[in-house]
Image: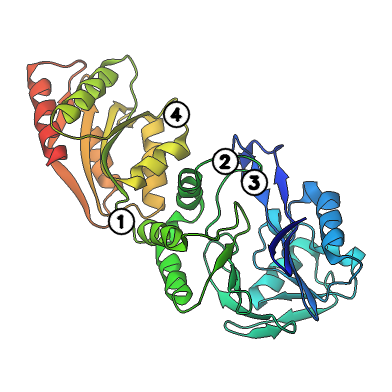
């Protein structure tokens, strides 16, 4: 039994069965579904876990309770990896009161039916629930990343139960760097809602936080400024690291040849960090993560059906639907008779904020020639300025 504090116990589970989180994101190191028990004059359980871990979770809860009966189940987020066991919990503890906001209970009715919850406590933003020594204040965080999401701040222990905020991919029994998988998780799942995360960070700035307990990933207890600063950068669409990303598709190898040459030219011009992603073969979420991490990107692709190659189109859609902004974009287009890739790409970013296109567009007519080689050299200089 893992203790967060003397009277807050971790009762979550690790999932190494899942291959795709949300049916989309590759999670080679699994996932954690976190849940917590606060032991006070009254007892609160914070969220449930995924449906495949009912017995393990209920056993964890029972061990933490030590024979006591929970008074409350606080539901911070209704996504099924956290809410699936609400009804199963109530079968074991039928007198417990379920705590959530109005939107929480509307979703609960959708999932479990109108009469599934007997005892409800509907809370408002900023409302406090006393357990005795622990006073839980509910902090609404709509669209981080569902509209009903709320966080819970315990002033007694200075713990912020942060729902999906500050979470990451990966089970807790695997050692790995926090930032890489937290970045991929944030950008993929929450990235569109930067403005809402900024609002949450402003609320959090008024709280004295010593520990962050997310619903995924490790409990954060040290150097919290590091995590808060990264969240501020990500949610304000700032540049985290200096470097140039090249994302490309290539049909017969000529565009790939141009990309390889550009990567070397970038290094020769002083760009210390150059990241190259073949969109047909790489993890798309990793490529999207790189695009948001670095401040400059080159998109290299072929004209395809009077449009752009499908993997590139899919990639750009990932960027634009997540409010990609404040970036410099270079373009390499390839086409044997009517290259239109550059035009298509620029149109796709038409509604994106603060996008600067490099002055030089490299146009390849089937294969590199003297003119397109010169354009590559010029593009490399522009991207390294």
Q: Is mark 2 on a helix, strand or loop?
A: loop
Q: Is residue 279 visible?
A: yes
Discs 2, 3 touching: Cβ within 8 Å:
no
Task: Identify the image quadrant of residue 77.
Answer: bottom right
**Residue 259's x, y, as percent?**
25, 24
Please, which colouring scheme is shown? rainbow
Q: In this view, does 275 lie above or below 238?
A: above
Q: Which mark is residue 238?
A: 1
- Looking at the image, is mark 1 or mark 3 earlier in the sequence? 3
Residue at image position (51%, 76%) is 208
The quadrant of the image that shows the N terminus is bottom right
* Front: mark 1 or 3: 3
- Reading the image, the residue beneath label 3 is 172
Where residue 270 appears, x then y in whole percent? Answer: 15, 33
**Can you say which quadrant of the picture contains the C terminus?**
top left
Residue 239 horizontal side relative to residue 46, left or right: left
Give the image location of residue 68, x and y in percent.
89, 71
Mark 2, Cα crowd under 10 Å, few <14 / some 14-19 / many 20+, is: few
Question: Foreground mark, 2 or 3?
Answer: 3
Front disc: 1 or 4: 1
Query: In this rendering, which labeled residue sits more in front, label 3 or label 4?
Result: 3
How many marks overall? 4
Cβ–Cβ under 8 Å for marks 2 and 1: no
Mark 4 lies on residue: 282
Q: Nearer the viewer, residue 74 or 339?
A: 74
Residue under the image location 35 percent in, 46 percent down: 293
Can residue 339 be seen by looking at this rendering?
A: no
User: Front-most of 154 and 56?
Assistant: 154
């Amino acid at each position: 039994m893992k203790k967060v504090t003397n009277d807050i116990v971790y009762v979550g589970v690790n999932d190494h069965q899942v291959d795709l989180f949300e049916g989309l994101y590759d999670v080679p190191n699994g996932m954690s579904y976190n849940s917590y028990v606060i032991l006070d004059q009254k007892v609160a359980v914070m969220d449930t876990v995924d449906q495949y871990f009912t017995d393990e979770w209920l056993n964890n809860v029972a061990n933490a309770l030590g024979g006591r009966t929970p008074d409350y189940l606080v539901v911070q987020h209704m996504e099924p990896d956290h809410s699936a066991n609400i009804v199963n919990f109530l079968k074991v503890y039928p007198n417990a009161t379920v705590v959530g906001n109005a939107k929480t209970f509307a979703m609960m009715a959708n999932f479990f039916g109108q009469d599934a919850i007997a005892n409800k406590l509907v809370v408002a933003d900023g409302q406090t629930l006393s357990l005795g020594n622990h006073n839980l204040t509910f902090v609404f965080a709509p669209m981080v990343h569902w509209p009903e999401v709320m966080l819970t701040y315990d002033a007694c222990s200075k713990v912020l139960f942060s729902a999906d905020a500050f979470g990451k991919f990966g089970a807790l029994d695997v050692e790995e760097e926090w930032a890489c998988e937290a970045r991929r998780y944030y950008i993929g799942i929450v990235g569109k809602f930067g403005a809402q995360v900024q609002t949450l960070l402003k609320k959090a700035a008024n709280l004295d936080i010593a520990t962050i307990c997310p619903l995924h990933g490790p409990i954060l207890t040290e150097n919290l400024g590091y995590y808060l600063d990264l969240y501020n950068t990500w949610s304000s669409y700032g540049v985290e690291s200096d470097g140039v990303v090249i994302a490309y598709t290539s049909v017969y190898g000529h565009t790939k040849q141009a990309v390889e040459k550009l990567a070397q030219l970038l290094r020769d011009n002083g760009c210390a960090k150059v990241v190259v992603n073949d969109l047909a073969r790489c993890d798309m979420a990793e490529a999207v993560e790189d695009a948001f991490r670095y401040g400059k990107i080159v998109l290299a692709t072929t004209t395809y059906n009077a449009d752009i190659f499908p993997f590139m189109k899919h990639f750009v859609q990932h960027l634009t639907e997540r409010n990609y902004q404040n970036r410099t974009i270079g373009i390499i287009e390839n086409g044997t008779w009517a290259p239109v890739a550059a035009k298509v790409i620029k149109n796709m970013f038409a509604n994106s904020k603060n996008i600067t296109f490099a002055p030089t567009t490299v146009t390849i007519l089937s294969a590199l020639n003297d003119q397109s080689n010169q354009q590559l050299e010029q593009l490399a200089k522009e991207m390294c300025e």
